[in-house]
């Protein structure tokens, strides 16, 4: 075969060897904005180190390997003994170890911990998203455990440790531990009050034996799990360790691993408890109350994770279009493609700015910020996670047939994209949670309105959107059926207010014109042509050295 038929031209170099943090202007500016000045150099340094690792060829290869070689269930050993272990590819352990070492489970014990962790998670998720599940659950378990000071004293140092130790042995013998959760059951799903797992109290205070089946239990090789079960006093939260203090295995039968659309590097299992030993977390009958802090923290991680997927997809699309030539010029200079890329970049920046604002509110911890989070987290979780899939799908299309091929990495992003909207309550759950906050917690609405009100007068389209939102909030007729519409409007107004205050004028102008002013079509790439789209795209371009 003639060598000339194998000449390679007009192919795009891989986006590798770059700083995922340093080349993300929206994220870098958010970190500078929300980080106390005395910590800024330290935080920038650690995020830069993480960003360079995430953008390296080595770590990108780990991500590909972890997804190509998914977890394998080993229910029995060679002699027939039940072992219920899950084997992961070494790349999974490398990714997880690097993340733990970078403090992605240590937000609760570091100054500005939530902001720096959220920024780090947004950076590191772009290398591989699946191992974010145990990171998120371990991080989010801390507020639940703090309802029991004795349990918190025992477990919190392990969960917030920067040491990752794989393998099943008593948590007390490890320098760091991971925690999962098992809430949902096949008959209830989100309706956890329908759970049937039973908890029978033992003679020792706070100790129980659990019997039941959990329909979804992610990261089953974790050192322990927060689970819900029906105790004599009602639905209660428990901490169930995989290995008992004496070194014996707690009954924890993994029936099968789920064959999932995406998130394939992570194991999600159906498990059964049969007289499994556990310790109560909080009071009997107050299980939902005990885990509410965990739910809020994991919902924020859904926002951060979706923002990360969007950012990586947009970065790949802009990178491709910067190098790919067609019809006499590079794609990024073609007016129509520039419109598409700018539209995608707007969605990505709005998600990033909102995610970092929420993380900063966690660090603030004041009453007003807690009230703001009560309504802003479910609204953001609803909207940002729902925007992720169409953004990633459109970004994939920017690469054409090359984007449809596994080697591009885009199919993996697309398979992962719907997860954030499903995990920790799908869209209806979030919209109804917004309604509950509106109806039961007037401080939450006041805090939300104060936040968006800080941008009033800066853009007439934002002002009009705020007025329309207030009109809709005043009309309670049929509000449950309108919950999604209202939640979407609130999330867009919040994003618009943040961009008007903090983003460059061309970004804020384009967002307000299209998302709040209605000057766009139903698909991406339908922004008004009079906007400064070239600047929007250039701002989002990942510049590799």
Image: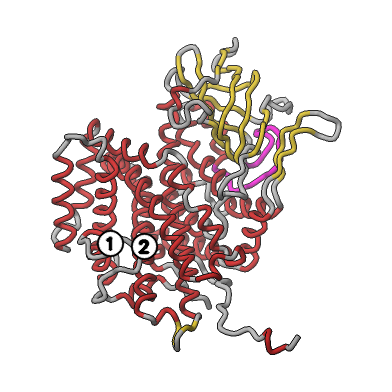
- Circle 1 — which element? helix
Report the side of 247 relative to 352 (left or right): right
Residue 499 disc label: 1
Question: Going 38% across and 46% down the picture, which residue do you hit?
Answer: 381
Residue closest to the eye, 55 or 333: 333
Question: Going 47% across and 64% down the picture, which residue do you hit?
Answer: 313
User: Magenta segment: does it hold 163?
Assistant: yes
User: Magenta segment: does it hold 97?
Assistant: no
From this viewpoint, is residue 158 visible?
no
Label 2 neighbour load within 10 Å: few <14, some 14-19, many 20+? many
- Residue marked by disc 2: 349
Task: Tell me if label 2 and label 1 are in contact, CB under 8 Å.
Answer: yes
Name above or below for residue 357 compared with residue 174. below
Image position, residue 416 (x, y; %): 52, 52
Name above or below for residue 110 compared with residue 124. above
Q: Main secondary structure of the magenta part?
A: loop
Magenta residues span: 160-176
From this viewpoint, is residue 123 visible?
yes
Q: Quadrant of the N terminus?
A: bottom right
Report the side of 375 relative to 344 (left or right): left
Residue closest to the eye, 424 or 386: 386
- Circle 2 — which element? helix
Q: How many dots with numbers? A: 2
Question: Going 71% across and 39% down the picture, which residue do you hit?
Answer: 73
Which numbered disc flags the more N-terminal residue, 2 or 1?
2
Image position, residue 138 (x, y; %): 54, 40
Image position, residue 400 (x, y; %): 50, 71
Question: Going 34% across and 78% down the picture, which residue do you hit?
Answer: 534
Residue closest to the eye, 224 or 157: 224
Instruction: Tell which residue pokes out farthest to the top in this image.
Output: 203
Image position, residue 246 (x, y; %): 72, 25
Report the side of 202 relative to 500 (left or right): right
């Amino acid at each position: 075969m003639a060598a000339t038929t194998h000449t390679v031209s007009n192919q795009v170099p891989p986006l590798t060897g770059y700083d995922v943090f340093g080349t993300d202007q929206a994220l870098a500016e958010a970190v500078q904005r929300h980080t106390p000045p005395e910590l800024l150099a330290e935080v920038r340094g650690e995020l830069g180190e993480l960003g360079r690792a995430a953008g390296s060829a080595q770590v990108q290869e780990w991500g590909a390997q972890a997804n190509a070689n998914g977890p394998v269930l080993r229910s029995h050993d060679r002699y027939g003994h039940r072992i219920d272990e899950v084997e992961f590819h070494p790349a999974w352990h490398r990714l997880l170890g690097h993340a733990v070492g970078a403090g992605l489970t240590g937000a609760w014990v570091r100054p500005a911990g939530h902001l720096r962790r959220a920024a780090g998670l947004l950076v590191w998720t772009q290398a591989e998203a699946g191992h974010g599940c145990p990171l998120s659950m371990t991080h989010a378990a801390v507020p639940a455990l703090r309802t029991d000071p004795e349990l918190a004293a025992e477990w919190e140092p392990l969960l917030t440790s920067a040491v990752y130790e794989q393998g099943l042995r008593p948590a007390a013998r490890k320098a760091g531990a991971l925690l999962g959760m098992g809430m949902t059951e096949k008959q209830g799903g989100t309706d956890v009050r329908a759970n049937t797992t039973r908890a029978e109290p033992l003679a020792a205070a706070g100790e129980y034996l659990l019997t039941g089946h959990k329909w979804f239990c992610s990261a089953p090789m974790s050192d322990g799990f927060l689970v819900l079960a029906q105790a004599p006093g009602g639905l209660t939260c428990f901490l169930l360790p995989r290995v008992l203090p004496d070194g014996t295995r707690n009954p924890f039968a993994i029936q099968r691993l789920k064959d999932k659309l995406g998130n394939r590097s992570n194991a999600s299992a159906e498990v059964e408890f049969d007289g499994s030993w556990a310790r109560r977390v909080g009071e009997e009958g107050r299980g939902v109350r005990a885990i509410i802090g965990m739910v809020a923290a994991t919902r924020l991680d859904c926002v951060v994770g979706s923002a990360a997927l969007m950012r990586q997809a947009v970065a790949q699309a802009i990178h491709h279009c910067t190098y790919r030539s067609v019809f006499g010029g590079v794609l990024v200079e073609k007016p129509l493609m520039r419109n598409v890329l700018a539209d995608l970049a707007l969605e990505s920046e709005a998600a990033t700015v909102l995610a970092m604002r929420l993380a900063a509110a966690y660090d603030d911890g004041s009453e007003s910020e807690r009230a703001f989070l009560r309504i802003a987290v479910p609204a953001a979780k609803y909207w940002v996670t729902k925007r992720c899939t169409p953004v990633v799908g459109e970004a994939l299309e920017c690469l054409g047939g090359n984007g449809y091929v596994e080697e591009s990495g885009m199919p993996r992003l697309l398979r992962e994209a719907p997860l954030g909207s499903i995990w920790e309550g799908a869209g209806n759950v979030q919209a109804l949670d917004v309604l509950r906050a509106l109806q039961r917690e007037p401080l939450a609405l006041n805090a939300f309105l104060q936040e968006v009100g800080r941008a009033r007068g800066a853009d007439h389209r934002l002002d009009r959107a705020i007025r329309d939102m207030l009109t809709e909030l005043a009309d309670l007729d049929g509000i449950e059926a309108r919950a999604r519409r209202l939640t979407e409007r609130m999330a867009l107004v919040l994003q618009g207010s943040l961009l008007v205050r903090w983003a460059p004028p061309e970004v804020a102008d384009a967002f307000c014109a299209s998302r709040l002013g209605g000057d766009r079509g139903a698909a991406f790439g339908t922004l008004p042509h009079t906007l400064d789209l070239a600047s929007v795209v250039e701002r989002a371009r990942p510049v590799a050295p």
